[in-house]
Image: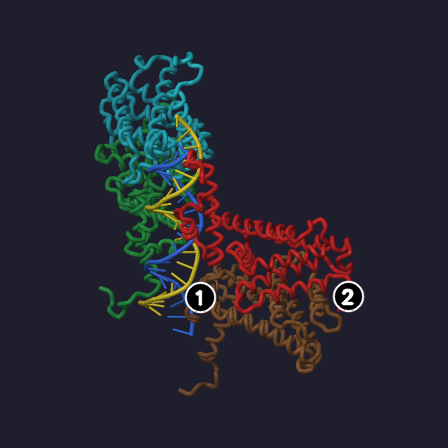
Chain colours: A green, B cyan, C red, D brown, E blue, F yellow
Amino acid sequence: MPSPVRARRTQVERREESERALLAAASEVIAERGINGASLTVIGERAGMSRGLPTHHFGSKDALVARVASAAQDRMADVLLDAIERSGHGAADMSGLDLVRASIDAYLEQFEHPSAEDRVLLVTWGATLPSQSSIEGMLDADRRAYEGWAQLITRGQHDGSIRIDVDPAASAVILHGMLRGVASLLLTESEYTDMTSVRATVDAWIAGALSPEVGPERT
Amino acid sequence: MPSPVRARRTQVERREESERALLAAASEVIAERGINGASLTVIGERAGMSRGLPTHHFGSKDALVARVASAAQDRMADVLLDAIERSGHGAADMSGLDLVRASIDAYLEQFEHPSAEDRVLLVTWGATLPSQSSIEGMLDADRRAYEGWAQLITRGQHDGSIRIDVDPAASAVILHGMLRGVASLLLTESEYTDMTSVRATVDAWIAGALSPEVGPERT
Amino acid sequence: MPSPVRARRTQVERREESERALLAAASEVIAERGINGASLTVIGERAGMSRGLPTHHFGSKDALVARVASAAQDRMADVLLDAIERSGHGAADMSGLDLVRASIDAYLEQFEHPSAEDRVLLVTWGATLPSQSSIEGMLDADRRAYEGWAQLITRGQHDGSIRIDVDPAASAVILHGMLRGVASLLLTESEYTDMTSVRATVDAWIAGALSPEVGPERT
Amino acid sequence: MPSPVRARRTQVERREESERALLAAASEVIAERGINGASLTVIGERAGMSRGLPTHHFGSKDALVARVASAAQDRMADVLLDAIERSGHGAADMSGLDLVRASIDAYLEQFEHPSAEDRVLLVTWGATLPSQSSIEGMLDADRRAYEGWAQLITRGQHDGSIRIDVDPAASAVILHGMLRGVASLLLTESEYTDMTSVRATVDAWIAGALSPEVGPERT
DNA sequence: CATGAATGAGGTTTCATTCAT
DNA sequence: CATGAATGAAACCTCATTCAT
């Protein structure tokens, strides 16, 4: 229960609360209608505020979208970290392969019941596919994400949990792409797919492809 | 008045030619700017024709987009069939696994130097990710595509080229998702990735995951 | 009475008529409310047409304003030429000084009962005074106008009607500035000024300053 | 509590200082961008203060603009008075004609290197040209200014320095208009004009037109 | 006295669509 | 069959103003 002495909020609190409400509303609306379909008017109203507030706070629609996108990325990164921490051992103790598998499983698990912010992650990415389209910072985030996979793989090769003859860059592209593609399918076809089976199968593929024990022959 | 042995093109031919030009132009513009960014005016002009022609021929923008999307899907299906036919043996002689591997490799090969129509395939797909967004017939096409993969896998299980304990539905989701995700990454990050290595690695993953010889243990 | 055979207008006629109506309406509204106060909505409605038509025809408000401004300039140039032609002799027969005097008198006469287009001439000019403001082609028109005065003065010096020791450039600046300043005052203070007397006095000043007979001493 | 000998500024002083800063900032911004282009936000920030301060102090934008305009007029009046005082003799000793000539020369000299406040004088005037536009007190100031010229001329006629047959009202209009028109031209075309020559020529015109010695014949 | 968060009217512009030619 | 003129809804954005702090 908040102290009754401060029934009124300070300016800073008002601003922060508004921004939070606007970002949440923007995530919702973008997840529903896409970036173009999400008008600032609707976002403002969804946040329970006025039409002009989104521009007032973020300066432009582009800036708001960029904020929404990066918030979604940050949130997913947190989800993955949390999942790894909750997986029993600290991240420091886990092998590279286990880190990869735990991360990917957590990612897919997240999309079994995706929130607006989860969906926004894929919606904003889908909007970058036209060649001229560009969302502020999107490409960079992409590159960081897949360099993260490459580093995990390299780490796994050092600790012996991942085969030496794996190409970290190529495998990172495939992991990253597979995650997104599968998550997107889950989004649009959720009623047609058995999530648990998909997650198990993805895990098996990755284990088979990366673990050194008995790998597939390279073609 | 008797028709003079088709000295000039018939109405039907002219209409078809206009439609072809409009579809090609629409593919280009959508690939560049996305569906929303592609205005009918620009599409008409890009086709070397008038502003009002797209509406005149297709009735509405939605209808035109649907036509563009399904044309892109049809074309990709043709590419895959061609690739399989060119792969030496007829499709009837190939094992289920080989069909899967050949199809996937052809798909990725196509995206090494993607045309506007290739890109439009992914752009229209990316536009379906918002929950309310719907492009006419897109969901159906999606479902057909991934049921195709499932059938190929089942066929492979019958002819012994694919392990029995593989879940065709789940694997189909993963194959389909991986293809799209990887192709999309190639689109936006083409200069950062070694295509040949990616294709080889994808093939190795699939072979390892599906071939019966020495599969990974299921977790 | 228009021929009943062509009750319907051609596309070209429609466009031209619309443009004329829009330019006239824009002149009116700009004369009344200034450039900023003249919204495209009001201009469209004043022309008896839709809100969006001004943009449709001219592409942007800036382009429309530029058209309005240059139309006003052209019209005033025509008025001056007409006045000179009507002044009895052809322009070729008149001395430089007489041309200057006739032009200036016609200009001021025009502002005794200014039309919207006359007023627009000064309104658009007034809008160029802020240092960053710029209306397409306005500065050029300005320069052409005052170079015209300078040429007339030089011509007068050659034909003996204007004193040799007059500096054409400086006098052109003064003539041009005086015209505008006086016309502007007439616009805002019309009820307080005796136009006829002002015109006569201006003419006397100019005659006295430029005619060679008995000039004022230079200070 | 006794005031500690003004260790800190009084409220009144702070308010006056803020207002001065705001007026200076407003003059700058209006001189640059015009009245419409000058937003209260920018003016507040240019003054090194907050966004809301202009409204807080002046109540409305219109009121602020009126203050800026009248401040600019007052300042120019001071400049002219100073110039006359510095011209050697007191104003009381000078003839009407000399007062006119000195005032006008000082005005034009001021516009050789115009400050923001000088420019704002013409910018606000230019904004009064649309027929419906009205800046509080602008018309009155205008009338006062040109009645001032008329009085000077009448005084000159009494002291014999100005010809009797000059119409004071008409001449006042011309003087006032010429000043503004020429000053405005200097503003936009400063690099194309030889200021010194313009000032000398203006002075010669006026001397010739008003001085009784050998006037031009009236037409 | 001063700040700046919030509002909402109004501006320009884009664009799918209708319809006359 | 084809053109493009015209409409008007809706988008983003700017900004004066109000009001809580």
Please rate how many residues cluster around mark 2, counting C-alpha atoms within 10 Å: few if below 14, some from 14 to 19, many from 20. some
Q: Chain of mark 1?
A: D
Residue D176 in picture, x, y percent from top left: 61, 68
Q: Horizontal and vertical percent for residue A183?
A: 29, 37
Q: Is residue B175 above or below residue A140?
A: above
Q: Circle 2 — which element?
A: loop
Q: Judge by depth and name the residue closer to the eye, B102 or C96.
A: C96
**What residue is disc 1 on?**
D61
Q: Is residue A176 left or right of residue A3?
A: right
Quarter of the figure with residue C201 = bottom right
Please identify the residue farthest to the bottom as the structure is shown.
D2
Residue type of the residue flagged with mark 1: Lys
Determine the CA span between mark 1 and mark 2.
53 Å
Q: Nearer the viewer, residue B103 or A158?
A: B103
Which quadrant does the C terminus of chain A fall into?
Answer: top left
Q: Is residue B32 visible?
A: no
Q: Is residue C31 visible?
A: yes
Q: Residue furthest front?
A: C1
Q: Residue at x 36, y 21 (%)?
A: B78
Residue plotted at (72% across, 54% down): C96
D215 vs C141: above or below: below
Image coordinates for residue C149, horizontal then vertical, percent = 68, 55
Report which quarter residue A5 is drawn in.
Answer: bottom left
Q: Amino acid at mark 2?
A: Val
A7 versus B7 height, above or below: below
Say which residue appears at 69% left-offset and 71% top-offset. D210
- Tell me the tag on residue C160: none
Query: What residue did someone put label 2 on?
Result: C214
Marks 1 and 2: same chain? no
Say if mark 1 contacts mark 2, CB within 8 Å. Answer: no
Q: Give the foreground label among 1 and 2.
A: 2
Q: Chain of mark 2?
A: C
